[in-house]
Image: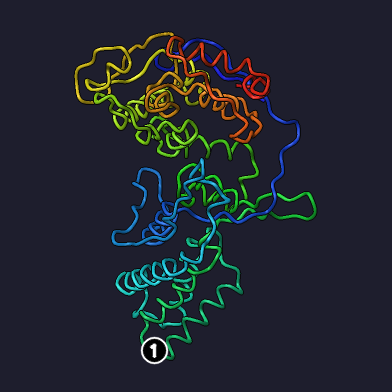
Amino acid sequence: GGTGGTSSGPGGAGGTLVVGCAEEPLAAPPRLVRLTRRQYENTVATLQSGRSRPGVPAPRPPEGLAAPFGFVNATDRFSSSVASNSIRPGDLPEIMSAAAHVATELAAASSKNGCLGKQPFEGCARSLLAAKGELALRRPLSAEELDRYADLANYAHSELADAQAALAAAYEALLLNPAFLHRTELGTGTGDERRLDDHELASALSYVLTDGPPDELLWNDAARGALGDAKVLASHVERLVGDLGKSEIFARFVREWFEYDRAPTIAKDDEAHRPEELVGDTDAFVGAVLAQSGRQAFVETLLTSKGGFARDTTGWSYGVKVTGKSPSAVTLDPRRPGILGQPSWLATFSHTHSNDPIARGRFVRESLLCGAVPPLPIENVPAIPDDETRTLREKLAAHVETPSCQGCHKLM
């Protein structure tokens, strides 16, 4: 367990957040985690340019690459959902096309800047495949694996009499290896005592925190078996997280957690409603909370901050007047603090002509309190009274008084 610090986010209230942990480490079954499209692109970029190094911009995904895995399961809450990140039959042509494209580019680069054509093919191809292989699989190739790819390159060279095409054939096989398309969480050891090895741990950290393969510093510590040291591991986590306020990974997680980016899908009858801009305002708010309180009291600040961001076209939604086209920091009504008071979140959990407090309450129960609301067939749900003389709050109070409704609504 651990304790957070005093909140320091925009308008954040002071306090200490206590987090509890299980006494025993939690175990997970062995699994393969398929790369996302962004992760595929970043891995290919590393194949082309090498691992990123301190002070040097990370490799950029190559232009013209039609990366696979563009399918997004609309029912997924999080884009990193392992269950949906599988390989579907429709992915195979894209995987094969991308592998052929990347392999051709890599072979051409090896011919231009490497040993290809300058040294005997067999030795050159073997050294190139060893280097590219550990970049592709995020671990050193075994002797058997290296022999297999080198034999393929030598056979292709004898058949094609074209060194670049032969090397491209071996690179293409490497890029079709399931170990390139997935990162593994298989572990080492026997029985229940299995732990991720250093290379698996390096990939898990790097892909989760950066959407890309291990950089040079993380790779070097994995290669020397240093990631079993908690202090070394913590230093890499801190370094890879970097500036939380600029982290696309963490901002995306919050966006998917609170679902406020769905605001534009809810039709409203107010012409002044600007859902896309409201989402941008909340993005700015989340970025500020991450930057100022991301390492301590983050959830507390996210839920209780009195600060926010608005612009000239959205200020009325917050009850403030703002000039300027870009989101600017503002102090908001203390009765609607934090992300649950953001118009983008409120619009997401609403109807065209009214609020939807039931959906909001269910979100809090399930997504913040980790509880569950039992399912109920829709035909068994009594209608909310249609009485124009009563407010929505009064209508819901009458609705909840119905015995068949109380079991669920008391949870929400």
Report x, y in % for residue 236. 52, 40
Taking the spot 44% from the left edge, 72% from the top edge, the residue there is 171
**Other residues around mark 1 within 10 Å, as few (<14) / some (14–19) / many (≥20):** few
Q: Is residue 170 visible?
A: yes
Query: In front: 382, or 183?
Result: 382
Q: Taking 394 as reference, is 249 above or below it? A: below
Taking the spot 63% from the left edge, 53% from the top edge, the residue there is 185
Report x, y in % for residue 251. 42, 34
Q: Taking 296 as reference, is 64 above or below it? A: below
Q: Taking 181 as reference, is 302 above or below it? A: above
Report x, y in % for residue 4. 57, 20
Q: Taking 283 as reference, is 190 above or below it? A: below
Q: Say what amino acid the circle numbered 1 marks.
A: Leu
Pick out the residue farthest to the left. Answer: 324
Q: Is residue 2 visible?
A: no
Query: In front: 319, or 382?
Result: 382
Report x, y in % for residue 370. 63, 29
* SS category of the residue bearing label 1: helix
Count up the numbered dots.
1
Q: Is residue 323 left or right of residue 278?
A: left
Residue linked to disc 1: 160
Query: In front: 125, or 346?
Result: 346
Q: On the rendered image, what quadrant is the C terminus found in?
A: top right
Taking the spot 37% from the left edge, 62% from the top edge, the residue there is 48
| Res 105 quadrant in image | bottom left
